[in-house]
Image (cartoon, rainbow, N blue to C red):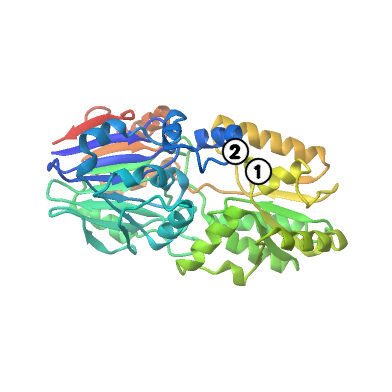
Amino acid sequence: MIKVWAIGGYEQVGNSMTAINFGNEKDWIILDMGFWMENLITAESKYGDLTNLPTEMFYELKIVPNDKLFFQKYGKNVKAIIISHAHLDHVGAVTRLATKYKNAKIITTPFTHEVLNFLDENKSVKNKRVYLNTGVIYQITEKTQMELIRVTHSIPSSTAIALYNDQGNVLYMVDWKFDNNPQLGKKIDYNKLKKIGKEGCKILFTDTTRVERIGKTPSERIARVMLESLLNYLKDTNRLIVYSTFSSHIARLKYVIELAKQLGREPILIGRSLRNYTKAAKRANIVDLSKKAKILKNGKELRKLNKKIKENRENYFLIVTGHQGEPNSVLERISKDEHPIKLKQEDIVILGSEPIPALPNLLMRGMLEERLLNKGVRLFTNVHVSGHAYSEDLKDLAKMIQPEYYIPTHGELNKNAKAIELLRRYGYEASKNAFLIGNNHLLELE
């Protein structure tokens, strides 16, 4: 019997945390431990820096998964906490919750390990760390092995987690898309996924973030072409260009820098999270963007840059944080005239993202765009493709893996229900071999 304790992420996008047990009550495994980003952003808007906020407040504000009941029953029996990738809605809560699972190793890729290092500013995580490359088989317990399998997503070193046990194999594939033209790194490991399907998969977990979108998710190559086309259209402008996207999207940052140079402009990165993620990518030997663009480190460098921009706006291409209108981000402060860099009429602002589909994000993004337009800038939005699977990606994965049971996660209940409905044609039925479950629901499967 396999037990699944759906701790978090089964009623929302993010807050991911799932516990798996293969029959021995002394051997539990946790997959992901993430923030609920919607609530995190709301809290940051209200309280500012949350670093010194007690963990109990993180529970009360529903920023971290509510693992209290699970911990009370099985906390001392957790042997491993495996993180699929370095987005905050999958790794953020490690800094708040992991240490109490004293017997659990934290298992990540080298890049996710580096991200966790800068997230853990107070050095609160005391667990033993293990970081693995994809394709390595690792023994977690006497009867359970694991493997991190390469997938394509919008952050480096994204993986699916495979658990191998004689009770049945489990594939946890949360945050991915089929991209055969990634702009950094290799494409998804189709051979390994097909092998798991051929050998037999007991349970498949997938995210449902973009399941309502018909068709196949476009490749990141399309986002590059979109930006390249836009910059070619704007190539004769003598105005300042400001671009913003996700700080963790290292592949995108790499080609944005390349396109800025092709335009004859100096690319400059501004913002703390940009510094942190690019440093993590360098330390994990993924790419060293500091060799390709200047990354500002302090206010002195910013003041020098500001003076140069005033003299020659046409020479610079600024890459900044704040595309969602996040509190205290660079672009948000620029839009409010609270930053040394000032926008002028006809300056160009490009948002390399779409709004995250949560009410606080939609409101903040809307207010950001309104402030920018009121300044008379030329605003170009949604120069972006998603990192999440659309409906056809999900269908193709289900055909490839053919799991005995399917469990959707990382989406609101309506998205999870939509995913089950999509897979009806392949023989999956709700409450029979596909399960729509809520947070803190315990599911037992023979």
Q: Is residue 69 left or right of residue 53?
A: left
SS of the residue under disc 1: loop
Residue 350 or residue 218, whichever sits in front? 350
Badge 2 amino acid: Gly
**Type of residue at label 1?**
Asn
Say which quarter of the image contains residue 211. top left
How many numbered marks appear? 2
Of the pair 82 and 419, the residue shown nearer to us: 82
Residue labelled with disc 2: 48
Q: Residues within 10 Å of mark 2 (few under 14, many from 20)?
A: few
What percent of the width, then of the height, locates residue 335? Answer: 75, 42
Vertical comparison of 61 with 283: above or below: above
- On the rendered structure, is 4 left or right of 124? left
Query: Label 1 to label 2, Cα distance in Å?
Result: 8 Å
Quarter of the figure with residue 223: bottom right
Picture layout, residue 263 above or below residue 165: below
Q: Residues within 10 Å of mark 1 (few under 14, many from 20)?
A: some
Q: Quadrant of the C terminus?
A: top left
Q: Horizontal placement of 236 versus 144: left or right?
A: right
Closest to the camera, between mark 1 and mark 2, is: 2
N-terminal-most mark, 1 or 2: 2
* Residue at image location 74% in from the left, 59% down from the top: 302
Secondary element type, mark 2: loop
- Label 1, on which residue? 328
- Taking the spot 42% from the left edge, 30% from the top edge, the residue there is 412
Residue 257 in percent (x, y) is at 64, 64
User: Are discs 1 and 2 less than 8 Å apart at CB?
Assistant: yes
Residue extending furthest toward the bottom? 291
Q: Residue at x 30, y 37 (%)?
A: 407
Residue 268 point in image, percent of width and height:
69, 62
Q: Is residue 202 visible?
A: no
